[in-house]
Amino acid sequence: MNLRIGNGFDSHRLVEGRDFILGGIKIPYERGLAGHSDGDALIHAIIDALLGAIAFGDIGELFPDNDPQYKNIQSDKLLHETLEHINKACYRINNLDCTIICEAPKLSPYKKNIINNLAGLMSIEPTQVSIKAKTAEQMGAFGRGEGIAVIATVLIEKLKSLETA
Ligand code: MG
């Protein structure tokens, strides 16, 4: 079996006047994630984990934040393009494990929606997607709720038909 692993990290500031979108799901909150795109730190960390797994650079190289075509773009479109690279490399996702560090809003009511949405976007089963949310115990910038951070790990496996070819 040909397995590869990748990790990704992302953080975004919380600012007023922006929607809070995480894993493609809009979560009601008084502030949202700043960013050139929609600021979806969860999808960005997943993209970096996927790119890392195939040693294909990083999100900033593929989707430069000074490129107008990515201004306010929905991050699921970036994920879609990333998955094309995974497909082209003849890999498929085995499983994904993500940790979100977020003081507020409380994410537990939305976890199931996020998991189902991510699974749909990646054409995998919800059981292949793990989302964990925790606070920073009021320590530092994340603990003060100035932003959120996400760590993602992904395991991918070579498609069998090509492994034996
Ligand atoms: Mg980002």
Image (tube, helix red, strand yellow):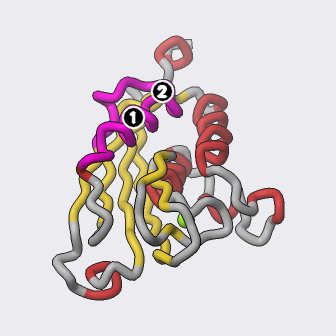
Left or right, 77 with reference to 145:
right
Judging by the rendered image, the residue that carries numbered circle 1 is 3
Q: Is residue 135 above or below residue 3?
A: below
Answer whether labels 1 and 2 touch (C-beta < 8 Å): yes
Mark 1 and mark 2: Cα distance apart in space: 7 Å
> Which portion, as a residue range, is magenta?
109-130
Q: What residue type is labelled 2?
A: Lys
Which residue lies at the image location 30% right of the left edge and 66% below the top edge?
Answer: 101
For label 2, count other residues whose C-alpha is less than 10 Å away and answer few (under 14), some (14-19) or many (20+).
some
- Picture quadrant of residue 88: top right
Query: Which x, y percent locates residue 110?
Result: 32, 46
Left or right, 116 with reference to 35:
left
Query: Which x, y percent locates residue 78?
Result: 65, 47
Which residue lies at the image location 52% right of the left edge and 29% below the top edge?
Answer: 91
Q: What residue type is labelled 1?
A: Leu
Q: Is residue 52 visible?
A: no
Left or right, 165 with reference to 104:
right
Query: Which x, y percent locates residue 68?
Result: 83, 64
Which residue lies at the image location 42% right of the left edge and 40% below the top edge?
Answer: 4
Q: In which quarter of the image is the N terminus?
A: top left
Q: Which of marks 1 and 2 is nearer the N terminus?
A: 1
Q: Indicate which disc residue 158 carries.
A: 2
Please tell me whether mark 1 sits on a helix, a strand or a loop.
Answer: strand
